[in-house]
Image: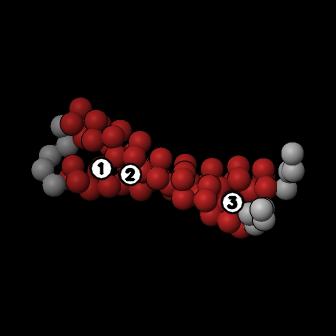
Amino acid sequence: MARDSCLARITAGVAVGGAIGGAVGAVYGTYEAVRYKVPGLLKIRYIGQTTLGSAAIFGLFLGAGSLIHCGKSY
């Protein structure tokens, strides 16, 4: 069985991190929008910003962790 390349592992880490971060960001953004009574269509914008920001940050960190872990063989 061939081992995955380093780039494939990093890409998978970024994708998984983005998915998890996006899900958490959507839940947190919805909670905050309702809690602070954001008016009308600004709720959608606020939830979208929170979702994308959380997905980007968590994807970045999970990708960086995959990059660090990539060189190690156990």
| Residue 57 screen position, x and y as percent | 54, 51
The residue nearer to you, when weighing 54 against 19, is 19
* Amino acid type of the residue that numbered disc 1 sits on in the rendered structure: Ile
Is residue 6 in view from this perspective? no
SS state under label 1 = helix
The residue nearer to you, when weighing 74 against 52, is 74
Is residue 25 in view from this perspective? yes
In the depicted structure, whether residue 34 falls above or below residue 14: above
Residue lying at the far top of the rendered structure: 35
Name the residue carrying label 3: 9
| Residue 68 screen position, x and y as percent | 78, 52
Q: CA distance from mark 1 to mark 3?
A: 30 Å
Q: Which residue is rendered at x = 74% and y = 63% of the image?
A: 4
SS state under label 3 = helix
* Amino acid type of the residue that numbered disc 2 sits on in the rendered structure: Thr
Name the residue carrying label 1: 47
Q: CA distance from mark 2 to mark 3?
A: 24 Å
| Of marks 2 and 3, the one in the foreground | 3
Name the N-terminal-most of marks 1 and 3: 3
| Residue 50 screen position, x and y as percent | 38, 49
The C terminus, quarter of image: top right
Residue 30 placement, left or right of 67 = left
Name the residue carrying label 2: 51
- State yes or no: discs 2 and 3 in contact (Cβ < 8 Å): no
The N terminus, quarter of image: bottom right
| Residue 61 screen position, x and y as percent | 63, 50
Color style of the picture: secondary structure
Picture quadrant where residue 2 is located: bottom right
The total number of labels drawn is 3
Label 2 crowding class (10 Å Cα cut-off): few <14, some 14-19, many 20+?
Answer: many
* Amino acid type of the residue that numbered disc 3 sits on in the rendered structure: Arg
- State yes or no: discs 1 and 2 in contact (Cβ < 8 Å): yes
